[in-house]
């Protein structure tokens, strides 16, 4: 695999694909009510964190604080260690990820065994509960079900994927640097963020398009993003490794 580090954010201005920059409270997105998690799963995203705010989320799907939540955070507390939480059980990787660089973060559940991968390499595993088969109504990207004590994400997200299958290490590694076609088996939610004009006037864009062909869900609604000229709180240049 190519090296995952060494790219500054400024280096990416010539890249054609886009990403979404979350600039802290109150930038977030929501998905409609749905079950989403009721067995094996994979959550993956490229993340470019600019600040390690307390427990900043990639996603947090549930019914309120500690109620049927499945969440993936790119920082445990403020120490920059990606963390998975499933139905009250949490664990995190041993090493912090860097600020201001792209990192690929994946969490899988295979039976009762959860694994967190960083840049395609398994870093930590733990036994966790199977997610309850229940409709989840608070399905956030970049926001916590626990409220603003866990601030909204200050990071750029690219190629966010949710699967209803546990992806293997080889599957993760083979496709982490490639955009999908959307029809892959088990792909339930897929956001490439390839909309609008990077750092331009995107004020007409209020939803992010779900590219998964068979997931049965729908687009994510944006809240409080500025979406106008400038790279903060807007669609911006994407990960050059995609």
Image (cartoon, helix red, strand yellow):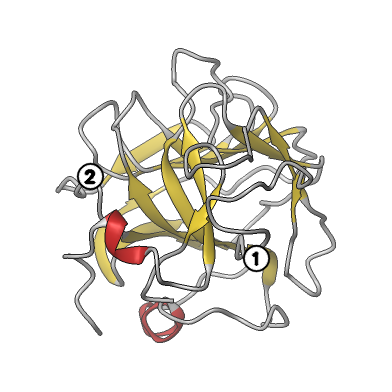
The residue that appears at 30% across and 33% down in the rendered structure is 51
Which quadrant holds residue 117?
bottom left
Is 211 on the left or on the right of 116, as rendered? right
Between disc 2 and disc 1, the foreground one is 2
* Residue 213 seen from this side: yes
Q: Quadrant of the N terminus?
A: bottom left
Residue 80 relative to residue 146: left or right: left
| Quarter occupied by residue 234 | top right
- Which mark, residue 99? 2
User: Which residue lies at the image location 75% right of the left edge and 37% below the top edge?
Assistant: 136
Can you see residue 43?
Answer: no
Closer-to-camera residue (207/71)? 207
- Which element type, helix, strand or loop, lies under badge 2? loop
Report x, y in % for residue 32. Answer: 81, 42
Mark 2, other Cα within 10 Å: few <14 / some 14–19 / many ≥20:
some
Q: Nearer the viewer, residue 155 or 67?
A: 155
Going by the image, does 102 lie left or right of 43? left
Q: Position of residue 181 (x, y in %)?
A: 66, 83
Identify whether 174 is placed above or below 38.
below
User: Dot 1: within a 10 Å radius of its alpha carbon, few (fewer than 14), some, or many (20 or more) residues?
Assistant: many
In this view, 194 is above or below 25: below
- Dot label at residue 119: none
Q: Which residue is mark 1?
A: 164
Q: How many circles with numbers are drawn on the protein? A: 2
Coordinates of residue 12 in the picture (x, y in percent): 35, 65
In the image, 127 versus 164, the foreground residue is: 164
SS for dot 1:
loop
* 227 in relation to 101, above or below: above
Q: Earlier in the sequence, mark 2 or mark 1?
A: 2
Between marks 2 and 1, how big is the CA–CA gap?
Answer: 30 Å
Residue visible at 25% across and 27% down in the picture: 78
Residue drawn 38% across the image and 37% down it: 90
């Amino acid at each position: 695999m190519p090296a995952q580090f060494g790219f500054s954010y400024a280096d990416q201005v010539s890249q054609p694909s886009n990403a979404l920059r979350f600039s802290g409270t109150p930038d977030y997105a929501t998905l409609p009510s749905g079950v989403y998690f009721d067995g094996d799963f994979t959550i993956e995203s490229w993340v470019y964190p600019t600040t390690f705010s307390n427990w900043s989320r990639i996603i947090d799907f549930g019914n309120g604080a500690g109620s049927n939540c499945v969440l993936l955070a790119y920082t445990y507390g403020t120490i920059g260690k990606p963390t998975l939480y499933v139905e009250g059980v949490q664990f995190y990787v041993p090493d912090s990820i860097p600020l201001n660089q792209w990192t690929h973060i994946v969490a899988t559940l295979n039976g009762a065994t959860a694994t967190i991968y960083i840049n395609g390499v398994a870093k930590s595993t733990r036994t966790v509960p199977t997610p309850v088969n229940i409709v989840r109504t608070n399905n956030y990207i970049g926001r916590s079900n626990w409220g603003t004590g866990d601030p909204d994400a200050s990071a750029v997200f690219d190629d966010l994927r949710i699967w209803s299958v546990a992806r293997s290490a080889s599957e993760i590694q083979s496709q982490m640097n490639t955009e999908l076609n959307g029809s892959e088996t088990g792909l339930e939610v897929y956001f490439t963020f390839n909309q609008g004009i990077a750092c331009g006037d995107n004020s007409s864009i209020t939803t992010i398009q779900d590219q998964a062909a068979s997931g049965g869900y729908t687009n994510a609604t944006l809240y409080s993003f500025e979406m106008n000229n400038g790279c903060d709180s807007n669609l911006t240049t994407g990960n050059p490794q995609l």
